Image: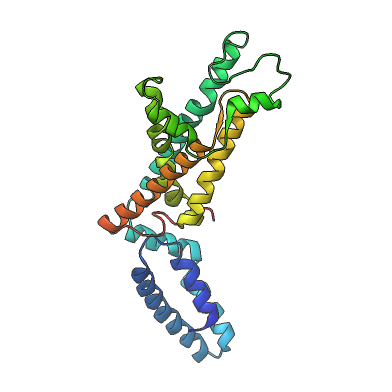
Amino acid sequence: MDKTIETYLNQMVNELNCDEKEKKEIAEEMNDHLNLLKNEYIEQGFTDEEAIQKALKSFGELRKISNGYQESLYPYYKLFRGGTWILFGLYSLVLLWNLLFVRMIDRIINHDLFNRYFWYPQNYNSIFDMEVWKLNASIIPFKNSFDYITGSQRFNLDIIINNTVGNILIFLPLGMFLPILFKKYNMLSKVFISSIIISFLIEALQFSLQIGQFDIDDIILNTIGCIIGYFVIITIYKIRNLPKKNIFQETKS
């Protein structure tokens, strides 16, 4: 296969919502059509390179062809993609509301009163004091989770659930949305790294704004939830024969 034609076909099929076997079949079919066009132009007296360029131009613009194939493979492509973006927006709003915004509002309203999200030692100067960090930062993995689980007599059940299972569940949808909406998140490693970064940023913001404690357990449990969400999508793919890499490929790279 000519290198120019091969590059053209790879770019086109990589945008499609289908498995690798279907992509290969489509590429082979299109290659046959392009070679027919190429031979017609060669017979008309054009050079090999000129014939290839004219064949590609005659065949059509890459994006339009890709979208046409996409519509034929998955008729509800635009509807599903649009609906998924709406759900992702709502999920992001709920996530940020619960972890940041509602706490910021509570902090502003009760600024001169009790802060239930952050502990202050006596005679502290700023949040950079070591005593503040000791009270509001935990960097020992699973220390707080173990305390919640073994200290059921000291904590209400809802507090235990929110700080253990809740931290897993709240990031589970993120692991599902990322590979669906963004092409570069079709690998577990990228979902894993992104979930750590996002969770770390939220923890850092909570601490710096004094609306929450920095807890390494939260980052670990959030990441576990995100990974579970990723495997849920992979499982759905295997059951329903959905595309493995990502459900809709026309995304930002």
Relative to residue 21, is residue 185 depicted above or below?
Answer: above
Q: Residue drawn at (50%, 28%), measured in percent from left and top? A: 99
Q: Position of residue 132 (x, y in %)?
A: 65, 24
Relative to residue 58, is residue 16 depicted above or below?
Answer: above
Where does the C terminus fall, quadrant-wise?
Answer: bottom right
Q: Of residues 133 and 25, which is closer to you in this image?
A: 133
Tally of numbered tags: 0
Q: Residue drawn at (34%, 49%), measured in percent from left and top? A: 232
Q: Of residues 155 and 47, which is closer to you in this image?
A: 155
Residue ranking furthest to the left: 239
Residue 250 seen anywhere in this rendered image of the structure: no
Q: Of residues 191 and 24, which is closer to you in this image?
A: 191
For this view, does 75 lie left or right of residue 129? left
Residue 34: name its quadrant: bottom left
Residue 57 seen anywhere in this rendered image of the structure: yes
Residue 74: name its quadrant: bottom left
